[in-house]
Image (cartoon, rainbow, N blue to C red):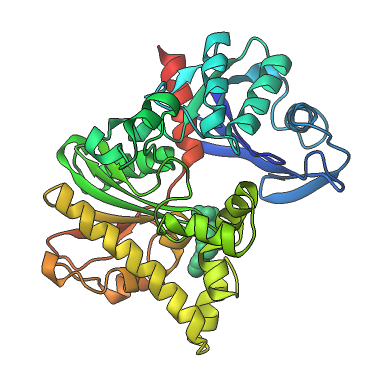
Amino acid sequence: MKILVLNCGSSSIKYQLLDMATETLITKGLVERIGLKDSVLKYTVEGVQRKIERDIPGHSEGISLVLDVISKGEHRVIDSLDEITAVGHRVTHGGEKFKDSVVITDSVIKDIEACIPIAPLHNPANLEGIYACRKLMPDTLQVAVFDTAFHQTMPEKAYMYGLPYDLYKKYGVRRYGFHGTSHRYVTEQTAKLMGKKPEDLKLVICHLGNGASVTAVKNGKSVDTSMGFTPLEGLIMGTRCGEIDPALVCFIMEHEDMTAKQVSRYLNSKSGVLGLSEISSDFRDLEDAAIAGDERAEMTINAFAYQVERYIGAYIMVMNGADAIVFTAGLGENSPYVRAKVCADLDYLGSRLDAARNEKGEKTRKISTDDSKVAVYVVPTNEEIMIARECKRFLNK
Ligand code: AMP
């Protein structure tokens, strides 16, 4: 069973073709600069990276090129598109309508389109991928997997903002949360690792990458998460500000003479650790600078780690305890430096990081001491496998 997983951004398409008999990667690639000068498809087959530079005016042409590369020519990995049994689409926002993944139909497309006003930066690009695949592979099962779906189990008290209720009724203004596919995958993997069922665990999952969010997962269900109405809320991120005093939006608009569109770009693309450090949005650069003695870099990492720590504390309280704290995504999986800062104050939990385990070991591992009451793990995320598993679930039905 071969499943194609697509993640379409406004000018990019990331894809993976997976063999789900063994959950292994067959090929992956990235189309970049769609509709711009110098568009390119970069792909990897059997560990060798290749690229095709050509004009790619839209998502349809991008997906068409990907399908050609996969199924025709000297680097093909399948002989016919019929070998692809399903396509899984990552869709950012499913609003309150989608509490689970769905098989894509005309009416599902209408409902995803209806979510565009609350996800104007993401859903239109996801839809482009869906339109293109339905045109190019009309007989293949297409499944939408939503970043928000896993968090639809949050109770009202966790998702309502202190704003007039009318905004919720009119526009669906509430916390939705994102990275749901990752939080769900990591929940399942952690439970396996601990030899338990997700239903029997309380986990705090820290997805720390360029975008970052912390989720409280109680009995296998998300009960609170740090991202909100959009992925801008919560932790300080690579270029996103995370939580700030909302009065600052008006303050910045007034004092920096910005329109609503400009301030949105400023908070999404110019802020976060990039804006704070004035060095980089990449934690590798910040760590290097901090270790070399750059005080601003150190302050930035400290501010980030402090926020993660604060969310962990809050979520352990709301779940009335925790069995494990789990680190995942680019930074969470790869930075012992940041993990050590986040976990500096675990004594009250009766837990301690094991310095050697934190520093190196298997990709998936426990990094707390064996006598820690709340265990700490590193568990690599894999959103593509989770999306493909969702497709498989529908194929098996
Ligand atoms: P992601 O969005 O999950 O792909 O994570 C990407 C981010 O992870 C990068 O921007 C870096 O900030 C961070 N990262 C990746 N590898 C490392 C590493 N070895 N040390 C520190 N940070 C890392």
Query: Left or right of 238: which side holds 376?
Result: left
From what the image shows, is residue 82 above or below residue 176? above
Query: Left or right of 10: which side holds 65?
Result: right
User: Residue 38, can we see it?
Assistant: yes
User: Residue 21, can we see it?
Assistant: no
Please identify the residue farthest to the front as the structure is shown.
Answer: 254
What count of labels does the image hold?
0
Pick the residue in front: 336 or 343: 343
Q: Residue at x 27, y 62 (%)?
A: 310
From what the image shows, is residue 144 above or below residue 46? above
Pick the residue in front: 147 or 249: 249
Q: Residue at x 29, y 76 (%)?
A: 355
Q: Residue at x 38, y 61 (%)?
A: 362
> Looking at the picture, how far across and down is residue 132, in whole percent?
71, 22
> Looking at the picture, how far across and down is residue 112, in whole percent?
53, 22
> Looking at the picture, how far across and down is residue 382, in whole percent?
46, 44
Quarter of the image with the C terminus in it: top left
Tell me which corner region of the image, top left, top right, bottom left or bottom right, holds residue 46: top right
From what the image shows, is residue 29 above or below residue 88? below
